[in-house]
């Protein structure tokens, strides 16, 4: 707290020129004219009790994101369940089963339905409960509220009311939308981090109204009262209109006084605020969209199959009821043994139509086995188990944050295997929002030897390649030479320093610089000592940060507005220029030289600070050193700085530019540093004018300030450049590389600036040198009137069509395009008339980067991709600003482990690190897709095989609706006798193991291409089911037609025939699944064989209980069937006949048209991967989708570049070169 | 906290420990099961496997087929259709009227034994176009009633044959009501051939399903007479014709056991059959056949099974040959990477 007090003395506004100067109250600033609809909200500050009654009673601060509550759960959840067509059908069947037309007993229809619906509802309830707990965690967070008489006390967030005065401390979230009254800084400014709202990481300055500044102590709130009249709750994050009535005066309010819920107070000890919007009225909640229930593609396709089957069902029911009608009319009168008609018209030859219609209902229920109710249960069970495996995967567990991966909804497991486009957030997802000072260029000399990943990999790959060539190819002179050159070249590039060596040193956050020439004071031995000194001075002086002494370590940490500024200060500290104190007018730096024992503390007077804005892209300080000399120190974007260099300040420009390009190419963030010495007179003349303008009143004041600053920041002398690494999350480039090789397209949607986004594009290998960048931007930003909007749109459309033409006309197959578009342009582009052109262009580009996009736009872009391309999209993000996109995409993935749970809460899967996405998709997605696809196909197969036999038999009973099977057989068929093997197929099947999945990313394409669930396959399986049903039924019927089936002369009755037939079905479908499985652990073995055994055990048990229950099946096995050899040999015959076509089919397929995973399995089986490692690695490298992005492609490009250089060198050295250098080896 | 160590580091490790413990609790436990790394057998379909599987099937199936065929050939079967021949010439225009009439319906048939028939010779009656498997028919019975005299009135399922003159029928229902009532008498060389009607039903039916204390009551007392009458003095468990009849057949054409002749018959023997042609199959044009048949271990005459076995066995042999030829002519080396999709159509991703 004490520290906070000290810092609070700083009047920060005097440090700033532009960002947060205090506008003087002037005549132009009138209160907003707010009357009428839309502006009805009244807030009585500090009088929350007034808001307890209508009409001022607003919604409470309790938030709820649950779908149901206790009362609505049952009706809503039941409604949800019966929205599934199949469930509705089963419900209907269950209701009808109570009528006499039902062929089965009612309980056999109701029980499974209750079970299925109950299970799904239990799952829903559990998920909603988790959501509720999450909400409550937020609702119960404590906030400090003014109770009465200037006493503040803690109260949970949910109890906060409109009008409450809240005190929020540093690094805490705002509990509701607040009006900032005052802060720990005297001038009432505070810093907020709005990462959860828009994903932007730089701090934003908010400032209180001048009038409310005095209320900056707990006690002062005793008597504080004011009234706010403002707009109604809305979702717009960046606008706010309202008036504050205080001391009988009206003051206008604008967005800069509003602190939004879920943003965080930073760099400020505390603030006071009045609650304006609570709970669901708050802007962030208004922005939240209802989480949609998502269904996977396979499930949607399955619905179509269900429709087909339903049609088949209705069709055969119609056939059978027509048949029944005809038989009833024409033949039944002659069947005296039936004594038709009956009293209920079910069998009335005089009314065949009525009887037929009754029979239709019977038939619909009877053939219900075609549409398996158990399919849904099995799929649910399988998906839950698959999700469990995802949760349990130790390779997706992040050791650092201690978070495992989590499948939050299990509906979409198989969708993971079909992803086509990934839309990714940047900050927090690709990058960790941490900057590392990596390299610098001072006075035209590059420092910093730490290599970044791309360089390292290129070098390694090249060395390996050259070795490989020497080993395998004929060693000729050129290659020998090449190898030598290669090595020397690599040394030249200084990239062989492996990362392991770096690992030995203690890492400093924000500083990965390594170079013996600069560290530990050795820079004094460098040629341009004075320039280097200046470089360090700029680093340590030109910033707006505040130092904070870490009591525990004795080091300073810095609270900076942006992370790269922090990185500079850490760098300066490590170089021996430790920024240790800031006062109102001075900066103190401890300079450490090796020649002195103790550091020298120097004071620099800060005369002016021209701060950073996105427009200016530079910042400068004017300081007076201890020797009285005045310097202007400036850092900024290289292009801006280079424009402002004086003639004699361009000494290092050329070299520095080369360095900057190199840095930029590897994805480093660069800034150029420059300075200028000022005369006392020159400065005071300028300053006089500057101060004059600064204190002046008028609309154009800001503009004039800018002009003045501009005039000062000229004729600079270039010192050098810095390269800061926007630290990528671990493994991100590799992961993107693998995903790209798996054929996935990756779009980056970020709230960041275009430059930052492009840098990150480079760093993640989404962009590379030689890629054609298509930037689409809006030209005239300032004009907003109607006409110009049209113009702007026209202009954008022209840009798009031009670009599209370029892309289409491009002949070179290796040419890659990158599309970069900013948020403002996107607003136009996403309108209906233009979005399809945009999408066409985007699809034609290898990578797409959208910068400065709002959360809403992220969602819109996602929707555009999803609906425009019709392919599966996956959105991944970590912040609340990604929620819309996560919800909109087919699959939403949240990065957990960071702050803010919103993204995770909205997501379908959560992982701790971006790099786990690879495993999630390529391993689990691939597996789950295949498992579910095969499982569903098999499920339909087995139910068709079974269901149709019922139909055939019915045709032999005069279409009367009699089933050949005992009711229990049918009940058990799906539930016990065939369910577990199919579940084990859905849970344990692996075509190839996880290692191979990762090694051969191309295998993933089987999912997006939908090779395992296309109509061809589905109909193939249905045909197989049809065949099986025919074989089972007719073979059995012919064999047991009329002859005795035992040596004892007995003929088979209906139960015996039914039991034999059913035995054949059990054998056939279980053997079939054994043929489908390619991965047998003991579990599968056990389940398949146990299922068959269970059937016999069931027969034994069921047959031995009293005939009261077992009826016809009494002793069926031991007395009737088992002693008859024909029973056993029929089973054998039918089973073999059933699986024969499938076996022949897969055998032919294997020998003529094997699929990739077949081959790989064979390679693995024969251990060829061990014996012929060269082949194995060659195939691995070939098994990539043609991609234009990613790390590997860049490495290839780098190798090409190095080779090019090599060749030049070689041809200059050896003129007898006759072998042309080919690049084909890598393409 | 240990005071010897600097407070900072102690604090650091302390917190690291607690967080570490917390983290570890979330860490998925390693087991081969959860990591999906269970040892598995991953069979692959090699040509060797395919060919030997097909060969194995043919090697097993063809002998079975041959044996079954032989067994089937051993069975001697005499089938005699008598439904139209047993109507006197004058009544042929009105068969239904004749069968429902009260005149004597005795009919004489002559059967010639084609081959030696070893005892036991099973006597069957075969009905055609009789829907014993019709749902209305199948459901119309009361098993409780058959089992025990206590459930005598348990006839709700038996409609429309549940009671006659206000009293429950035992056995009730359409199935029992329509009991087959043709009778056969065999004479050979003017000697009566005894027909053993015991043990023609399943033992479990006699013991458990048809009660020893249940006697027929009010049977065929209604206005409509269906089929056979039952001896009210014999318990149901001894009425084996009824027990056999009550096991409804699966198909509209069915054979049911009538009795056994426990004498060998020689080839060329002539058997005279005196039958009572009582049962009405004429309403629905049903055929009636009398069948005498021996059995083998396989049951009755059943060529189909053997043929089916031979067919499947032959097909598998053929497939095995095809695969051998494929293997010889166009072998695909297993694990040959040139078959990988990216090698087969390069650039065609």
Image (spheres, coloured by chain):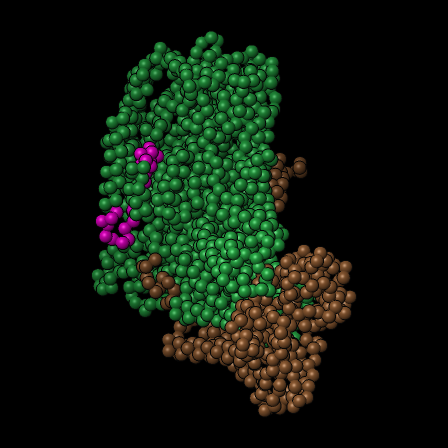
Tell whether position A816 is magenta.
yes
On-image quarter of the N terminus of chain A: top right
- The percent position of residue A979, horizontal first and vertical second, equals 57, 58
Residue A592 in view, yes or no: no
| Residue under the image location 54 percent in, 65 percent down | A334
Q: Most extreme residue toward the top, as rendered?
A: A248
Residue A43 in view, yes or no: yes
| Residue under the image location 53 percent in, 44 percent down | A81
- In the displayed structure, would residue A33 be above or below residue A438? above
| Residue under the image location 55 percent in, 47 percent down | A91
* Residue A1203 located left or right of residue A1104: left
Q: Write down the quadrant of residue A1071 in the picture.
A: bottom right
On-image quarter of the C terminus of chain A: bottom left
- In the displayed structure, would residue A763 be above or below residue A676? below
Specify the colour of chain A. green
Q: Write down the quadrant of residue A569 in the picture.
A: top left
Tell whether position A918 is magenta.
no
- The percent position of residue B111, horizontal first and vertical second, equals 59, 85
Specify the colour of chain B. brown
* Residue A1207 located left or right of residue A141: left
- In the displayed structure, would residue A1051 be above or below residue A774? below
Nearer-the-camera pick, A1069 or A539 = A1069
* Residue A804 located left or right of residue A1065: left
Nearer-the-camera pick, A1170 or B345 = B345
- The percent position of residue A1162, horizontal first and vertical second, equals 46, 68
| Residue under the image location 44 percent in, 65 percent down | A1158
Q: Write down the quadrant of residue A1132 in the picture.
A: bottom right
In the rendered structure, which segment of residues is drawn in magenta? A807-831
Nearer-the-camera pick, B344 or B167 = B167
């Amino acid at each position: 707290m004490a520290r906070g007090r000290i810092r609070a003395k700083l009047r920060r506004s005097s440090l700033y020129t532009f960002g947060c100067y205090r506008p003087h109250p002037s005549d132009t600033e009138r209160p907003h004219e707010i009357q009428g609809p839309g502006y009805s909200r009244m807030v009585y500050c500090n009088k929350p009790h007034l808001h307890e009654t209508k009409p001022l009673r607003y919604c409470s601060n309790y938030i709820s994101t649950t779908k149901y509550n206790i009362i609505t759960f049952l009706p809503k959840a039941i409604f949800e369940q019966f929205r599934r067509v199949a469930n509705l059908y089963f419900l209907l069947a269950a209701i009808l089963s109570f009528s006499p037309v039902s062929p089965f007993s009612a309980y056999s229809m109701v029980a499974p339905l209750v079970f299925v619906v109950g299970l799904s509802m239990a799952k829903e309830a559990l998920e909603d409960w988790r959501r509720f707990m999450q909400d409550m965690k937020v609702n119960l967070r404590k906030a400090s509220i003014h109770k009465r008489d200037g006493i503040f006390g803690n109260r949970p967030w949910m109890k906060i009311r409109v009008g409450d005065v809240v005190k929020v401390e540093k690094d805490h979230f705002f509990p509701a939308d607040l009006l900032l009254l005052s802060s720990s800084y005297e001038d009432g400014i505070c810093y907020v981090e709005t990462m959860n709202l828009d994903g932007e990481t730089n701090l934003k300055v908010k400032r209180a109204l001048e009038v409310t500044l005095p209320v900056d102590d707990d006690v002062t709130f005793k008597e504080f009262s004011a009234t706010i009249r403002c707009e109604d709750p809305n979702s717009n994050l960046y606008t706010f209109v309202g008036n504050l009535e205080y001391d009988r005066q009206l003051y206008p309010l604008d967005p800069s006084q509003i602190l939004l819920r879920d943003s965080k107070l930073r760099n400020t000890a505390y603030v006071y605020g009045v609650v304006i919007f609570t709970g669901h009225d708050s802007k962030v909640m208004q922005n939240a969209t209802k989480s949609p229930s998502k269904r996977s593609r396979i499930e949607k396709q399955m619905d179509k199959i269900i429709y087909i089957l339903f049609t088949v069902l209705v069709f055969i029911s119609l056939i059978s009821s027509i048949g029944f009608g005809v038989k009833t009319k024409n033949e039944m009168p002659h069947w005296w043994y039936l004594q038709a008609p009956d009293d209920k018209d079910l069998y009335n030859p005089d009314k065949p139509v009525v009887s037929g219609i009754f029979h239709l209902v019977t038939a619909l229920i009877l053939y219900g086995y075609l549409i398996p109710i158990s399919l849904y249960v099995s799929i649910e069970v399988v998906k839950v188990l698959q999700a469990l495996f995802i949760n349990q995967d130790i390779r997706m567990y992040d050791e650092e944050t201690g978070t495992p991966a989590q499948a939050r909804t299990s509906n979409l497991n198989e969708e993971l295997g079909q992803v086509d486009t990934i839309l990714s957030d940047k900050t927090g997802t690709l990058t960790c929002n941490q900057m590392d000072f990596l390299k610098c260029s001072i006075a035209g000399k590059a420092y910093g030897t730490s290599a970044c990943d791309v360089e390292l990999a290129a070098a390694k790959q090249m060395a390996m390649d050259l070795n490989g060539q020497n080993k395998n190819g004929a060693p000729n002179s050129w290659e020998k030479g090449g190898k030598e050159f290669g090595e020397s070249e690599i040394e030249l590039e200084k990239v062989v320093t492996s990362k392991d060596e770096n690992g030995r040193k203690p890492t400093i956050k924000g500083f990965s610089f390594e170079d013996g020439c600069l560290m530990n004071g050795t820079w004094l031995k460098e040629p341009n000592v004075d320039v280097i000194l200046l470089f360090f001075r700029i680093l340590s002086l030109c910033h707006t940060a505040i130092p904070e002494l870490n009591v525990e370590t004795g080091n300073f940490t810095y609270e900076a507005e942006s992370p790269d500024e922090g990185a500079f200060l850490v760098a300066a500290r490590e170089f021996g220029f430790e920024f240790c104190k800031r006062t109102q007018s001075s900066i103190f730096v401890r300079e450490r030289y090796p020649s002195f024992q103790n550091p020298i503390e120097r004071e620099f007077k800060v005369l002016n600070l021209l701060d950073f804005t996105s427009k200016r892209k530079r910042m400068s300080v004017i300081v007076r050193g201890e020797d009285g000399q005045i310097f202007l120190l400036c850092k900024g974007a290289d292009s801006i700085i280079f424009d402002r260099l004086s003639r004699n300040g361009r000494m290092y420009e050329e070299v520095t530019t080369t360095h900057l390009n190199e840095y930029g190419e590897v994805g480093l963030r660069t800034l150029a540093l420059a300075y200028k010495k000022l005369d006392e007179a020159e400065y005071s003349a300028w300053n006089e004018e500057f101060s004059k303008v600064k204190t002046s009143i008028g609309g154009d004041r800001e503009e004039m300030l800018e002009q003045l600053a501009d005039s000062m920041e000229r004729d600079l002398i270039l010192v050098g450049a810095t390269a800061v690494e926007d630290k990528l999350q671990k493994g991100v480039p590799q992961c993107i590389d693998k995903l790209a090789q798996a054929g996935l397209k990756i779009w980056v949607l970020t709230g960041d600036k275009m430059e930052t986004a492009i840098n990150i594009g480079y760093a993640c290998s989404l962009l590379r040198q030689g890629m054609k960048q298509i930037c689409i931007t809006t030209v005239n930003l300032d004009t907003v009137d109607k006409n110009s909007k049209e113009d702007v749109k026209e202009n954008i459309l022209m840009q798009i069509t031009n670009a599209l033409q370029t892309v289409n006309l491009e002949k070179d197959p290796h040419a890659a395009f990158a599309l970069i578009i900013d948020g403002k342009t996107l607003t136009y582009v996403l309108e209906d008339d233009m979005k399809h052109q945009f999408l066409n262009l985007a699809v034609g580009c290898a990578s797409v980067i959208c910068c400065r996009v709002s959360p809403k736009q992220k969602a819109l872009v996602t929707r555009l991709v999803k609906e425009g391309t019709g392919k599966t999209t996956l959105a991944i993000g970590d912040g609340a600003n990604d929620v819309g996109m996560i919800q909109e995409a087919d699959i939403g993935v949240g990065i957990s482990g960071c702050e803010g749970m919103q993204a995770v809460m909205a997501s379908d899967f959560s992982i701790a690190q971006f790099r786990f996405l690879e495993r999630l998709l390529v391993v689990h997605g691939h597996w789950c897709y295949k498992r579910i696809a095969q499982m569903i196909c098999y499920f339909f197969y087995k139910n068709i095989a079974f269901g149709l036999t019922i139909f055939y038999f019915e045709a032999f009973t005069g279409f009367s609706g009699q089933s050949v099977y005992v009711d229990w057989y049918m009940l058990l068929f799906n539930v016990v006798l065939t369910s577990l093997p199919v579940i084990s197929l859905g849970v344990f099947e692996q075509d190839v193991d996880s290692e191979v999945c990762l090694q051969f990313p191309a295998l993933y394409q089987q999912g997006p291409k939908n090779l395992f669930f296309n109509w061809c396959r589905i109909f193939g399986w249905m045909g197989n089911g049809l065949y099986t049903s025919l074989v089972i039924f007719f073979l059995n019927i012919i064999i047991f037609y009329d002859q005795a089936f035992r040596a004892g002369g007995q003929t088979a009755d209906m139960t015996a025939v039914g039991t034999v037939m059913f035995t054949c079905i059990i054998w056939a479908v279980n053997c079939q699944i054994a043929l489908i499985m390619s991965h047998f652990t003991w579990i599968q073995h056990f389940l398949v064989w146990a299922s068959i055994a269970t059937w016999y055990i069931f027969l034994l048990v069921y047959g031995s209980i009293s005939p009261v229950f077992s009826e016809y099946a009494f002793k069926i096995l031991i007395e009737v069937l088992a002693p008859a050899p024909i029973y056993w040999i029929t089973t054998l015959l039918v089973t073999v006949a059933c699986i024969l076509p499938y076996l022949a089919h897969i055998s032919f397929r294997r020998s003529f048209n094997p699929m990739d995973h077949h081959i790989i399995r064979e390679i693995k089986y024969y251990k060829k991967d061990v014996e012929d490692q060269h082949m194995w690695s060659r195939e691995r490298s070939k098994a990539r989708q043609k991609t234009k992005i990613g790390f590997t492609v860049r490495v290839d490009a780098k190798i090409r570049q190095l080779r090019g250089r090599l060749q030049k060198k070689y041809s200059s050295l050896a003129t007898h070169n006759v072998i042309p250098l080919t690049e084909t080896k890598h393409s | 906290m240990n005071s010897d160590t600097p407070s900072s580091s102690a604090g650091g490790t302390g917190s690291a420990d607690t967080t570490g413990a917390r983290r570890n609790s979330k860490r998925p436990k390693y087991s081969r099961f959860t990591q999906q790394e269970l040892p598995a057998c991953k069979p692959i379909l090699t040509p060797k496997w395919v060919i030997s599987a097909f060969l194995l099937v043919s090697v097993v199936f063809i002998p079975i087929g041959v044996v079954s065929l032989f067994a089937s050939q051993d069975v001697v079967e005499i089938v005699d259709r008598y439904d139209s021949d047993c109507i006197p010439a004058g009544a042929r225009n009105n068969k239904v009227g004749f069968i429902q009439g009260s005149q004597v319906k005795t009919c004489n048939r002559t059967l010639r034994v084609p081959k030696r028939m070893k005892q036991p010779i099973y006597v069957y009656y075969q009905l055609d176009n009789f829907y014993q498997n019709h749902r209305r028919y199948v459901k119309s019975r009361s098993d409780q009633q058959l089992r025990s005299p206590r459930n005598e009135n348990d006839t709700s399922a038996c409609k429309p044959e549940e009671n006659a003159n206000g009293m429950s029928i035992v056995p009730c229902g359409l199935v029992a009501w329509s009991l087959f009532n043709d009778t056969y008498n065999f004479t050979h060389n003017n000697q009566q051939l005894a027909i053993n009607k015991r043990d023609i039903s399943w033992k479990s039916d006699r013991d458990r399903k048809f009660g020893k204390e249940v006697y027929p009551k009010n049977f065929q007392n209604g206005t409509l007479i269906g089929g056979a009458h039952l001896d009210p003095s014999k318990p149901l468990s001894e009425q084996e014709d009824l027990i056999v009849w009550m096991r409804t057949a699966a198909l509209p054409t069915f054979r049911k056991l009538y009795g056994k002749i426990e004498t060998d018959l020689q080839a060329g023997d002539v058997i005279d059959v005196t039958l009572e042609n009582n049962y009405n199959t004429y309403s629905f044009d049903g055929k009636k056949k009398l069948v005498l048949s021996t059995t083998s271990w396989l049951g009755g005459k059943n060529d189909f099974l053997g043929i089916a076995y031979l067919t499947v066995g032959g097909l598998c042999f053929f497939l095995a040959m095809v695969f051998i030829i494929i293997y010889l002519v166009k072998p695909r080396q297993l694990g040959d990477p040139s078959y990988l999709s990216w090698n087969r159509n390069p650039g065609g991703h």
